[in-house]
Image (spheres, rainbow, N blue to C red):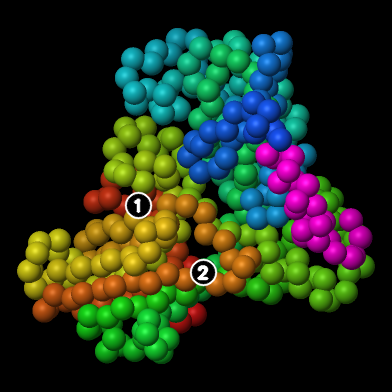
Amino acid sequence: MGTGKGIRGFLKDHKTTIIVLALIAFIGGGVYWYIGLSPQTDTTTPAKTASTITFLSYIDGEDVSSFVEANIWVPKSSATFDDAEDEYKLTTKFEKEESGKDADDISIDMRDFEDFAWLEVTGNSVFANTFHKLIVGANYDYTFYVHDLSSDVNFNVFVRDTLAAVTVADYQTDNNLTIIMDVDHEVNTNNHYGDNWAISTDDFNDMTLSDKKEIWDEALWQSQAPLYDPRVDEEREFDDDLEQLTDALTLRIEFNTTVSTVDGNVAQINMTINDAAVPVEIIISGTYIYLLFTDVITFEDGAYSFDLEIKFGANITLSDIDSGRIVVPRDDENLGTFTKYSDIGT
């Protein structure tokens, strides 16, 4: 691809065509389902002898199947599936049928299996590792999004009505707040090009600085997405939206003492997200409240923002807020490792 509009320009020019083709495919009998985190489009005919895999980069829609690798886990011949949890016991019930192959090199006959299979996106150091459960017994052309996670999520908190930056005093009083999150826009390391990309290294080197800055803008290529790993979820003990993820973006809000959920307690915090469309699960765990994002968050149209109402008990104060990602290993009382991105205001 040359130095003109680049891949985003191509997608914008062809957006209508892509939408029309997608609608035709749907109306024509394609099956659409939603498992976990990404759309999976399955089309099949009785004579189809093998299943195929296509990976699309989530933000720009580029087909990256030629260099993003995957594993296919299928049931062991000795496996039984007597309980609902059995299909998630990857390490004991499944084995790799395909391992470390580029997605477009995978061709597997799913008619040979009767229960379930798992697709593991292993990425190529750019895209995040995640899993998708596959229905077997027939062959499909599977299409999944893959996610290039941003290197950071910087954010700030403002008083909603005035958009004044929050002060320490605002932390300790009941308030309506607006949280604004963003990503780095010129990191000089987001190399969305190379031998395997539509934009080659040679083409990139010939670009003007302004064109290179488009490649370095994380908002144009990267996002924050929840991920799923059945090895962390074998007992299926999560609640609500947490059933769909095991690793996710979060804002971790720290308090001076253990947060109470008892009405009227002096250490109680009442917190409300003021827009039901915001994909956030509020998790209370010890001295922390986590705002855990259960769906993909993008920044290509600008900073991501939402409103939050918070009310304090008499003897509890807010100490700090960080962005980061957290592992959800079993239940919301025992959250796993938190990996920090940024402090509030950075």
Q: Secondary structure at mark 2?
A: strand
Q: In the image shown, does 221 or 45 lie closer to the viewer?
A: 45
Would residue 13 be counted in the magenta stretch?
A: yes
Does residue 257 lie above or below 63 as drawn? below
* Whether residue 230 is visible: yes
Q: Quadrant of residue 168?
A: bottom left
Q: Quadrant of the N terminus?
A: bottom right
Compared across the picture, whether 74 is left or right of 61 comes to left
Give whichever of discs 1 and 2 has the lower sequence position.
2
Q: Residue at x 65, y 55 (%)?
A: 59
Q: Which residue is mark 1?
A: 336
- Tell me where the magenta segment starts and ends, as one range: 1-23
- Could you say which disc has been placed on residue 304 in the image? 2
Q: On screen, 163 above or below 54?
A: below
At 13% from the left and 75% from the top, the residue drawn is 313
Where residue 6 appears, x then y in whole percent?
83, 61
Q: Quadrant of residue 218?
A: bottom right
x, y percent for residue 150:
59, 62
> Main SS type for the magenta part?
helix
